[in-house]
Amino acid sequence: MHFSYEKVYTVDELKGLVEVGNINFDPQFVAVEGLVFDEGNKWILMRRGPGCRDEQYKLEGIGGRVDDESDLVAALARELREEAGEDALISVVEPFEIRTDTVFDSRLNRTITWVIASFICVHKSGDMKICEPTKNLGFEKLTLSEISIDELSSSAKSAYAELLENWESVKEIISKGFNHD
């Protein structure tokens, strides 16, 4: 569920924002997500594998849990390398949105709420590789009009709705990412 368009860069900023919104903040359930686009404005989604905690075989943005990092961009850069490999040059352009997603976690055998900081990113060059084959079955590049909602994870559905609603400004951010050296 969309929560805010505030531009946050640190876990502390994120914590302060969600506490004001009366959202239960559990540091072990903070995630970063790259909404990665190519030069053709296609969203690069990852197909979740059987090793994921939830929503296996669904499509979603590239990212994962924030570990010990306090800097959200550093955490996202790590996740992008872990998911897409060292050869893929993916630039984090700017924060997009903060949202929550409540899912059943099969490892913990309970329902949890993730706080997700999403960033618009661009894939500038290099091959994206499947680095964690049990968690990532592959990457799919789709325009927003090509996406089947049923194929998306609940979190990706929320991101998709926000991308559609803000598509003109998102395209400007993507363009800025490709034109920035």
Image: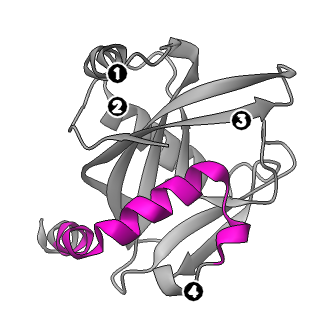
Q: CA distance from mark 4 to mark 1?
A: 34 Å
Task: Pick whichever of labels 1 and 2 is earlier in the sequence.
Answer: 1
Identity of the residue drawn at 33% across and 46% down: 97
Q: Are marks 4 and 2 in contact (CB under 8 Å)?
A: no
Amino acid marked by disc 3: Val
Identity of the residue drawn at 49% across and 49% down: 80
Viewer-nearest of labels 1 and 2? 1
Q: CA distance from mark 2 to mark 3?
A: 22 Å
Amino acid marked by disc 1: Gly
Return the residue at label 2: 72
Task: Pick whichever of labels 4 and 1 is earlier in the sequence.
Answer: 1
Identity of the residue drawn at 35% across and 13% down: 19
Return the residue at label 3: 103
Residue 125 magenta: no
Element on which disc 1 rests = loop
Viewer-nearest of labels 4 and 2? 4
- Please give left or right for residue 79 compared with residue 73 in the image: right
Residue 179: where, in percent of width, then height? 13, 74
Element on which disc 2 rests = helix
User: Mark 4 Cα within 10 Å, few/some/many (few <14, many 20+)?
Assistant: few
Return the residue at label 4: 146
Q: Are marks 4 and 1 in contact (CB under 8 Å)?
A: no
Viewer-nearest of labels 2 and 3? 3
Query: Is residue 127 among what the camera can see?
Result: no
- Please tell me whether the stretch drawn in magenta is mainly helix, strand or loop: helix
The image shows residue 178, relative to residue 14, as above or below, that is below
Q: Are marks 3 and 4 in contact (CB under 8 Å)?
A: no
